[in-house]
Amino acid sequence: MVGSHVAIKTQSFPSPFGDWCFSRADPPFDLTKDVEEFWESKGHVAFGFEKMVPRGTVDLIFNLAGPQAMYSDENRSSPRFFKRAW
């Protein structure tokens, strides 16, 4: 839609590795049948996993930056890099 504006909602959170933020936006009207929302996260989170209730949807994740890394300790001394998939 030309001239339409998307409302982006952003929340910031502290982490021992630095702050991170989560942004979300509703899709344009012509995609609402197929897309629930767009979201983006930036920064370094401290949690190693998330618990999510099944919703009957699929999340497509695109990494538009460098490889993702996961650390097995708080000292960040033994990273495991995910270059092709997350």
Image (cartoon, helix red, strand yellow):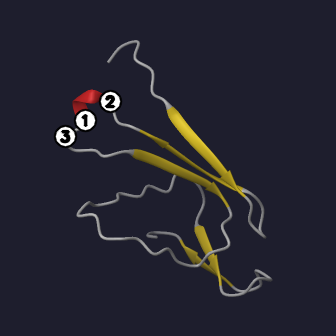
Q: Quadrant of residue 67?
A: bottom right
**Sequence-earlier tag: 3 or 2:** 2
Q: Within 10 Å of the Cα at label 1, are there few (<14), some (14-19), or many (20+) other Cα atoms?
A: few
Q: CA distance from mark 3 to mark 2?
A: 10 Å
Q: Which mark is residue 31?
A: 1
Asked if disc 2 and disc 1 are in contact, CB closer than 8 Å, the reply is yes
Name the residue type under label 2: Pro
Q: Residue furthest left?
A: 33
Name the residue type under label 1: Leu
Check the image and report above or below for 22 versus 73.
Answer: above
The secondary structure type at the circle numbered 3 is: loop
Asked if disc 1 and disc 3 are in contact, CB closer than 8 Å, the reply is yes
Q: Residue furthest top?
A: 3
The secondary structure type at the circle numbered 1 is: helix
Asked if disc 3 and disc 2 are in contact, CB closer than 8 Å, the reply is no
Q: Quadrant of the N terminus?
A: top left
Question: Which residue is found at the position 37% from the left and 45% from the top?
Answer: 37
Q: Which mark is residue 33?
A: 3
Question: Which residue is found at the position 78% from the left and 62% from the top?
Answer: 18
Residue topped by disc 2:
28
